[in-house]
Structures are given as C-alpha cells and as structure tokens.
Image (cartoon, grey):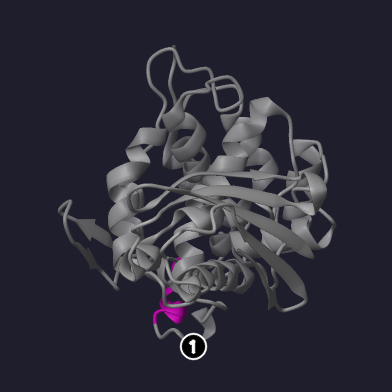
Amino acid sequence: MTSSMLIGNARIDIRIEDNTIRIPAKDILHWVKSAAESVAAYYGRFPVPQVLIRITPFKGSGVHNGVTFGDRGGRILIRVGDKTSPSEFASDWMLTHEMVHLAFPSVEDKYHWIEEGIATYVEPIARIQTGNFKAEEMWRDLVRDMPQGLPQPGDRGLDHTHTWGRTYWGGALFCLLADVEIRRQTNNEKGLEHALRGILEAGGDIRKKWNLEDVLRVGDRSVGVNILEPLYERMKDNPVAVDLERLWMQLGVQSDGTSVRFDDNATLAAVRRAITVRESAAAQDPSFLKFLAVFAGRAADLRDWRRLMNRNSE
C-alpha cells in the first residue's frame, strides 16, 4: 500500500511493504498524521518538504526499530506489528522521535549525542502540544530516566563517551539545561524550540551536513542569548555532574516514581509550564510576575545555573 498526505506544505509518502497487513489503513494514516502534526506544532512547520515513511510489518504488535536518513529528501524506516491496536498507535513515541531527527542537520558521528538528545527531549513535548501526551507523564519520565544521562566513572564528556545513556539521556540533559536557561535569560519569552526553529529556518535540516559549532551559534543567535555554545564548551570534554534533585525542586516537580505532583510556588514553576505549552503562555501566567521578581537583575548571569553542575574527575 502506498499513500500520501499533506501536513502544511509538506508531503508525507507512506509505503507499507506487505500488502497482506491486516491493520486498517485508517489506523496507520492517523498514527502518521498525529506524529507529523506534533512535530509541526513544535517547530512551527514540518521540517522537510517531502519525506518517505517505509513501514515493514512483523508478526506481533507495537512499533519498533525506527531509523531516519537524510538522503533522497528524507526517509524513515520503521517496523509495525501486524496486530498493533489503535491504542498502541496512540501511545507510540517512536515515529515522533524519528520525525524530530528530520529537523536537525547531520553532524559528525561523535556528536550523535545531540541528535538523539534533541529527539529524546523534544518528542514528548511535541506530543503534549497536540494533546497526544500529558505533561505529568513527561515529567515523571524525566525524573525517572534523566539520571541515566549523568556521567559515570571514566566519562570523558559528551563528545567522547558514546554509551547509550550518555548518547540519549546525556543529550536530553543538555537540552533540558539549555531550555531552562534560555527561558530564564529571556524572561520566559524564548525557549529551546525557538533556537531549534532558528536552526531549521537557516536551512539546518537532516538533508544538510553542518559543523556543530555553527549549529549552536545559529541557535544562540535565534534566541538572542548565548547559552548553547558555552554549555557545549563546558560539557563536551568533561564529565559534568548535574544536581538533578535541586533542578526538579526549582522546577516544582515532585515524583514518587509512579506519579508526579507540581509545586506551582517553586522558583521555576513558570518555566516548567512554559516548556510544554504550544506557544509560551508565560505572559498570561499569574506566577510569571513572581518569576520576573525572583530573577530581576540576574538575566545575564549563569551563577545559579552553574551551581547545578559540578565537574567530576575521572
């Protein structure tokens, strides 16, 4: 089966390799459409003009083994079980994760952590923005999984430590720290999505090969504050530990492992809320005035941010 759909001005071609698959075509098309709309919501548009999604069925259920390439205009290969239910499609994160990869330029292999880190961090936010996921679930998952991104003994920084945890969750940790600090320094008017949108609008999608330093420079210029480059300089060659407990406390996230509660009086509660809204609603947030008062006069300094991080020795 081959089908196509438009998301804005972008065309998505869907090809199912086995015509005997028993899943209704409408379920597959709805799954693809939901993922594409989530990514378009986060980036302001779908990342590339055209992409081919090639679906290979397998016996069973669920979605597995997604991989994204920048050749031929962009293509995604993904496996789907022939018994996958509508509820399993609705809860899938993998196709959204793969589509996020389309929105960032190809970089050298040693920088794979930023490609996977962005996809890991952005995917749940994008799904929340279109009503396909809940903020409570995202923050619960971050509290549970983010420690996997912290440096372990022998770590040599993000550019030189290519373990699964540092690649996916170390990269996601970089994104979270950058998002929080961009919002702090811009009084919640800009966030990481604005940096990533700026990179995309400058031509930086998966079809192009860029130098990482140039990518980060464009991102910083897009938000008007210098965050991505100095954060990268700090984390690329050194094992930087982050005080996650303090960060969750500042964001007002309290988790017992199975559920999460929010403290809306926390110092960075307005930042936490702004991270997951479709367009920043910070100006309408009653706690935003409190946020401004707390950080008045400190918009250009990184002292509090840096207190969260301590350099470990090997």
Q: Is residue 136 above or below residue 69?
A: below
- The quadrant in which residue 29 appears is bottom right
Residue at image position (52%, 21%) is 161
Q: Position of residue 6 (x, y in %)?
A: 70, 76
Q: Tell me if residue 291 is in the magenta stretch.
A: yes
Q: What amino acid is at disc 1?
A: Gln
How crowded is the residue under tag 1: few (<14 C-alpha within 10 Å), some, or many (20+)?
few
Residue 224 position, x and y percent, is: 74, 61
Q: Quadrant of the C terminus?
A: top left
- Looking at the image, can residue 37 be seen? yes
| Magenta stretch: helix, strand or loop mostly | helix
In the image, 146: left or right of 73? left
How many numbered badges does the structure rendering display? Answer: 1
What's the residue at 74%, 40% (across, down)? 106
- Percent from the top left, x then y, of residue 300? 63, 56
The residue shown at (69%, 51%) is 75
Residue matched to label 1 = 284
Q: Quadrant of residue 198?
A: bottom right
Residue 273 position in % (x across, y down): 42, 72
**Residue interval drawn in magenta:** 287-295
- State the residue lying farthest toward the front: 20
Write down the quadrant of residue 288 in the picture.
Answer: bottom left
Q: Tag 1's secondary structure?
A: helix
- Left or right: 61, with 68 as reference point: left
Magenta-span inclusion, residue 225 = no
Does residue 180 appear in the picture of this structure? no
